[in-house]
């Protein structure tokens, strides 16, 4: 296919599949191209099919992050089919996510664990972080 003016802004196909030691979690990561379109970022998405705890230890980052929780069922876009407990802040304030949601984690904000306590239907969990690499700082 001939090179186009804006084609460089479209990535097609799965980029990288990474294994996991947790049952019920399938992970895919977008780690390239580096500095894509001048934006330092990474995307990581997980298909969650059973209860699991991710990011067990409270931590923070030197970058902004978004945690996205969504259904895989387009017939029921407002039904998550899961219950996730998320801890935010140094106080580990508990929040229950049971509808499709996006959580903004500003740089420096302590968060985790992300506890998928109940999974009745598969969930797509995506974290988007504005950094070329994922580095955790212990809380």
Image: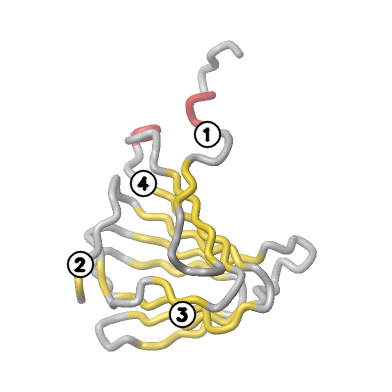
* Left or right: 24, with 133 as reference point: right
Q: Is residue 47 above or below residue 31?
A: below
Alpha carbon of mark 3 to alpha carbon of mark 1: how far? 31 Å
> What residue appears at the point 65 percent right and 68 percent down from the top-left corner?
122
Q: Secondary structure at mark 1?
A: loop
Sequence-first tag of 2 and 4: 4
Q: Secondary structure at mark 2?
A: strand
| Camera-side residue of 138 and 26 | 26
| Marks 3,2: beta carbons within 8 A | no
Sequence-first tag of 3 and 1: 1
Q: Which residue is mark 1?
A: 11
| Quadrant in which residue 91 is drawn | bottom left
Circle on res. 41 = 4
Sequence-first tag of 3 and 2: 3
Q: Nearer the viewer, mark 4 or mark 3?
A: 3
> What residue appears at the point 52 percent right and 24 percent down from the top-left corner?
6
Question: Residue 54's spot in the image, x, y percent?
Answer: 41, 72
> What residue appears at the point 54 percent right and 16 percent down from the top-left corner?
4
| Marks 2,4: beta carbons within 8 A | no
Circle on res. 115 = 3
Circle on res. 137 = 2
Judge the density around disc 2: few (<14), some (14-19), many (≥20) Cα neighbours within 10 Å. Answer: few
Alpha carbon of mark 3 to alpha carbon of mark 2: how far? 19 Å
Alpha carbon of mark 1 to alpha carbon of mark 2: how far? 31 Å
| Marks 1,2: beta carbons within 8 A | no
> What residue appears at the point 20 percent right and 76 percent down from the top-left corner?
139
Q: Nearer the viewer, mark 2 or mark 4?
A: 2
């Amino acid at each position: 296919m001939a090179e186009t003016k804006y084609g460089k802004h479209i990535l097609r196909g799965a980029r990288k599949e990474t294994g996991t030691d947790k049952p019920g979690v399938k992970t895919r990561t977008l780690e390239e191209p580096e500095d894509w379109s001048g934006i330092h970022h990474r995307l990581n998405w997980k298909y969650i099919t059973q209860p699991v705890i991710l990011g067990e230890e409270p931590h923070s980052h030197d970058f902004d992050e978004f945690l996205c929780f969504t259904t895989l069922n387009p017939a029921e876009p407002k039904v998550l089919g899961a219950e996730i407990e998320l801890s935010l802040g140094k106080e580990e304030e508990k929040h229950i996510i049971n509808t499709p949601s996006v959580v903004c984690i500003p740089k420096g904000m302590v968060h985790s664990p992300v506890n998928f306590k109940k999974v009745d239907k598969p969930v797509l969990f995506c974290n988007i972080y504005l950094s070329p690499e994922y580095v955790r700082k212990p809380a």
